Amino acid sequence: MNFYCQLDYEQIPYPSPTSPHGNLANNGCGVCSAAMVVEAMTGRAFPPMEAARFAKACGAREGFGTNMAVFAPAFSRAFGLHYAATSDPTLVQAFLEEQRGLVIANTQGDRDGWVGVFSDSRHFVVLSACSGGQVAVWDPMLSPDRYDKPGRAGKVRLEGFTAYADFSVIANDCAGRSYYLFWKGETIHDV
């Protein structure tokens, strides 16, 4: 599976009416997350440039960032994946612990009483697995000192391009935000 870091794609334009100078480096976390989910789950190529074109074509790029509520069902259909959205972290943890698929999480960032661990503001990351309460995260904004900021330090352990954290860190980072679940095969009715 390919890991995609949005910082590698500054040269790829990703404009919108509210972000006319947007590019994948500053607005591409959703696009890179979708690319990683599709490629990991299907084995088919869906590089960030193609994912960005797809997001624009389906109407998911009209404001800041990517509207995952529009993008997720569109790319799921195109690649034969099932999709569901939830804001319940308990369902997400069970889904991952049971190895049912992958999840795109929407972090909230900094707020009163909480320093955003995966971003200062809203940001998409891929939750690729969870075991014993430890979640594996593919962060498309990964950089060497990303998790050294005061308030983040000690909450994330890096191994290659995968960040590991206690699931409670994700639940706090995504409080009140949506999670997008993807799976193959039969429809899962209890998600």
Image (cartoon, rainbow, N blue to C red):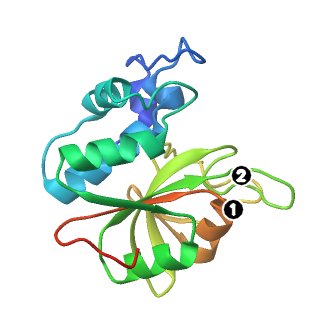
- Mark 1 is on which residue type? Ala
Identify residue type, mark 2. Lys
The answer to whether the residue labelled 2 contacts the one labelled 1, judged by CB atoms less than 8 Å apart, is: yes
Residue 45: percent from the left, percent from the top? 15, 41
Residue 40 left/right relative to 159: left
Say the numbered circle drawn on residue 153.
1
Apparent side of residue 124 relative to residue 57 in the rendered image (left or right)? right
Quadrant that contains the C terminus: bottom left
Q: Is residue 48 visible?
A: yes
Q: What residue is at 43 percent from the left and 32 percent from the top?
A: 60
User: Given the current orientation, which residue lies at the most extreme top position?
Assistant: 20
Residue pointed to by mark 2: 149
Residue, x 69% and y 62% (percent of image)?
153
Residue 21: percent from left, percent from top: 53, 12
Where is 76 relative to 98, above or below?
above
| Whether residue 30 is situated above or below residue 127 in the rendered picture | above
* Label 2 – label 1 distance at C-alpha: 6 Å
Q: Give neighbour class at mark 1: few <14, some 14-19, many 20+ (Cα, 10 Å).
A: few
Instruction: Please state which of residues 29 and 86 is positioned toward the viewer in this rendering.
Output: 86
Screen quadrant of the N terminus = bottom left
Q: Residue at x 46, y 44 (%)?
A: 68
- Give coordinates of residue 151: x percent, y percent: 76, 59
